Image (cartoon, rainbow, N blue to C red):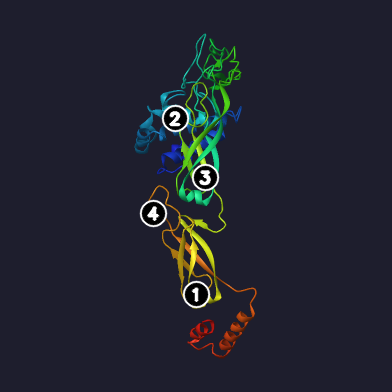
């Protein structure tokens, strides 16, 4: 029987990228894997067929020969190799990611710690940690130093992270021989799963350390100073290398990420590097024009010139009075929106003046000299 086209098997086009081919194979591997289809000969055949197609199309040289000469071009290549051969190493990696298998094809791969007597468990990198820090908008503008306390796992000083009592060492796990995995035969597969005795470490601690009870790490709290640069905003992350949890079995520590949250301000609203605020002006200030004081985020008073006839919602720009540009130079701007305030209560004199203005408005709204008459009324 003639073989099916490899592209047809994976369901991809001939111009597909390497990632598209890999993704297509992963989908088929999940669908037809023997563990999910026990006793299904057709699924097993589809699984092997997809693996063969991927072994050819994932290799640039093999794919090129297949595109030119078809199956004849790869008759002695990866497509003709058996399970566990070098051409299938990429497939083993993919299936290991999908199913957590050490070596689904029984071809070895992976480092062995087998042996008798003492053994060293595999080192593992420590976990990264996150610390959420809330600061004010003023602190974000100027930058600051913060003292934070971080609870984390650190290597035990007594056993130096091994988990074994002083003067002893972990023993090689007798169940898995130190590999951390136990192999099972499933049809034409040789499948390895995590050893339940040592939980994948390959070692067993006979005499646990009294200080950490065999864990190799202890929870401690560390206080450290963190420098927050000017211009940070909500969501900014500061990475502190090697300040995360200690690694297991002597592995390197993880990192600490400080995530910034800037509290809302009662006066200013931030958008990118700019600030926005609203200031009230009286009716006469808006009508006649005036200079009003505006306090910036830094607490510095600035004089804002409001021209005559200014309406509610008019926005003025104060250049360079916004937020510092993070990791750069300069600052954003401050945009001030004017709100004309109507007085809630009036004195007798104010009421008399406004009544005079009302009379003028009723009789001469179309008069272009209305503003001058307003000036005359209010002096």
Could you classify mark 3 by the number of other residues whose Cα lies within 10 Å: few (under 14), some (14-19), or many (20 or more)?
Answer: many
Read off the residue under disc 1. 310
Q: Nearer the viewer, residue 377 or 79?
A: 377
Which residue lies under the disc numbered 3?
260
Q: Position of residue 288 (x, y in %)?
A: 49, 78
Q: Which percent across, then down, holds residue 296?
A: 48, 59
Secondary structure under the numbered disc 1 in the rendered image: loop
What is the x, y in percent for residue 16? 42, 43
Q: Which of label 1 and label 3 is nearer to you?
A: 1
Using the image, determine if residue 39 lies above or below residue 182: below
Q: Mark number for residue 330?
A: 4
Q: In this figure, which residue is indicated by the disc labeled 2?
A: 90
Residue closest to the eye, 301 or 88: 301
Q: Are marks 3 and 2 in contact (CB under 8 Å)?
A: no
Residue 371 drawn above or below residue 106? below
Q: Which circle, 4 or 3, is nearer the viewer?
A: 4
Which residue is pictured at 51% across the width and 40% down the height? 146
The crowd level at tag 4 (other Cα within 10 Å; few <14, some 14-19, many 20+) is some
Q: CA distance from mark 4 to mark 2?
A: 51 Å
Position of residue 173 relative to residue 284, above or below, is: above
Q: Earlier in the sequence, mark 1 or mark 3?
A: 3
Q: CA distance from mark 4 to mark 3?
A: 21 Å
- Residue 206 drawn above or below residue 308: above
User: Which is more N-terminal, label 3 or label 4?
Assistant: 3
């Amino acid at each position: 029987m003639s073989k099916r086209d490899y592209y047809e098997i994976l369901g991809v086009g001939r111009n597909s990228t390497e990632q598209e081919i890999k993704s297509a194979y992963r989908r088929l591997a999940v669908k037809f894997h023997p563990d999910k289809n026990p006793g299904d000969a057709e699924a097993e055949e589809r699984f092997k067929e997809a693996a063969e197609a991927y072994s050819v199309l994932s290799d640039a040289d093999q794919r090129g020969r297949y595109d030119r000469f078809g199956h004849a071009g790869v008759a002695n290549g990866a497509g003709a190799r058996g399970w566990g051969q070098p051409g299938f190493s990429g497939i083993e990696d993919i299936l290991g990611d999908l199913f957590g298998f050490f070596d689904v094809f029984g071809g070895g791969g992976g480092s062995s710690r087998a042996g008798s007597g003492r053994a060293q468990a595999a080192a593992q990198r420590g976990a990264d940690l996150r610390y959420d820090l809330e600061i004010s908008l003023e602190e974000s503008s100027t930058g600051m130093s913060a003292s934070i306390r971080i609870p984390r796992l650190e290597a035990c000083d007594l056993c130096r992270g091994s988990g074994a009592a002083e003067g002893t060492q972990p023993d090689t796990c007798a169940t898995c021989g130190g590999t951390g995995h136990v192999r099972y035969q499933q049809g034409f597969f040789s499948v390895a799963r995590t050893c339940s005795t040592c939980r994948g470490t390959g070692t067993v601690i006979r005499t646990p350390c009294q200080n950490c009870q065999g864990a190799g790490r202890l929870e401690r709290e560390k206080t450290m100073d963190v420098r927050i640069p000017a211009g940070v905003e909500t969501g900014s992350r500061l990475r502190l290398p090697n300040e995360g949890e200690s690694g297991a079995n002597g592995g390197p520590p993880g990192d600490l990420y400080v995530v910034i949250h800037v509290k809302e301000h009662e006066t200013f609203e931030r958008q990118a590097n700019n600030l926005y605020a609203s200031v009230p002006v009286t009716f006469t200030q808006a009508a006649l024009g005036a200079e009003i004081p505006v306090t910036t985020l830094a607490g510095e008073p600035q004089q804002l010139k409001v021209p005559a006839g200014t309406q509610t919602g008019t926005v003025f720009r104060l250049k360079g009075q916004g937020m510092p540009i993070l990791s750069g130079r300069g600052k954003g701007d401050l945009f001030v929106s004017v709100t004309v305030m109507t007085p809630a209560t009036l004195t007798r004199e104010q009421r008399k003046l406004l009544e005079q203005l009302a009379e003028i408005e009723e009789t001469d709204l179309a008069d272009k000299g209305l503003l001058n008459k307003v000036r005359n009324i209010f002096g």
